[in-house]
Image (cartoon, rainbow, N blue to C red):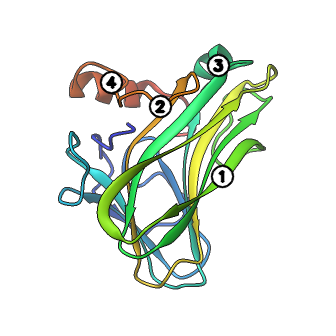
Amino acid sequence: NGAFDIWQRGTSSSTNATYNSADRWWMYYNAGTTTYSQEATVVPAGFRYAMKATQSVATGSFVMVQCFETTTAVTLASKTVTFSAYMAATAAASVNFYVDYSTLTDVGPTGTWTTVSSIIQSVPSGSAYARYQITCTVPATAKSIRVGVTANTIAAGTSVYFAGLQLEEGTVATPFRRNANSLQGELAACQRYYVSE
């Protein structure tokens, strides 16, 4: 659901530390309130929707992560991967972009994780999207993988937009592709995932 096509739980939520908006994405904030909502207007070319995260206070931060089950994660162990996303913001924002791993099986978002690599991405103000990426090598012992974005101490009322999040093998972010060849297939892929839902 890297294109945010599937929203079975609703299209807007301010509930903390839960799966409560776009399928497969777990949301958290540490101060004030972050509202996560479906965005259909400010989207990059080729996408129907984006995720819009709006922070209420400047002292807060928000986190958006997705965990990959062991059957997927072990296929990437010892391999170089690239995590990419399109991002835009209503005011300049610093976004931490990262890949984590765990040696445990089917770990949920609040489990024990170790960072493989992270980088701070500076997202300028404006509605024009740019694509950002991070490349790293997944440890051989990885049994679960988590990708995430965290925005820290952004101006109150700032909205950050995310679209086309993709983790793939290789050193280059290739054109975005969905997990399945149809929206019905993407829905089925969302529904089949493990217990962290």
**In terms of secondary structure, where does tag 3 sit?**
helix
- The amino acid type of the residue labelled 4 equals Ala
| x, y percent for residue 89 | 38, 67
Q: Earlier in the sequence, mark 4 or mark 2?
A: 2
Q: Nearer the viewer, mark 4 or mark 1?
A: 1
Type of residue at label 2? Ala
Q: 10 Å neighbourhood of mark 4: few (<14), some, or many (≥20)?
A: few
The N terminus appears in which quarter of the rendering?
Answer: top left
Are the residues tagged 4 and 2 within 8 Å (C-beta)? no
197 relative to 79, above or below: below
Task: Check the image and report above or below for 84 versus 192.
Answer: below
Instruction: Report the residue marked by disc 3.
Output: 76
Q: Which residue is mark 1?
A: 119
Viewer-side residue, 137 vs 108: 137
In this view, the mark in front (1 or 3): 1
Q: Residues within 10 Å of mark 1 (few under 14, many from 20)?
A: some
The amino acid type, in three-letter code, at marker 1 is Ile
- The answer to the question of whether label 2 and label 1 lie on touching residues, with beta carbons closer than 8 A, is no
Measure how far apart labels 3 and 2 are at the Cα level: 16 Å
C-alpha distance separating marks 4 and 1: 32 Å
Tell me which corner region of the image, top left, top right, bottom left or bottom right, holds residue 96: bottom right
Secondary structure, mark 2, is loop
Label 3 Cα neighbours within 10 Å, binned few <14 / some 14-19 / many ≥20: many
Q: Helix or strand or loop: what does disc 1 sit on?
A: strand
Residue carrying label 2? 173
The tag earlier along the polypeptide, 4 or 1, is 1
Whether residue 79 sits left or right of residue 9 in the image: it is: right
> Badge 4 is on which residue?
188
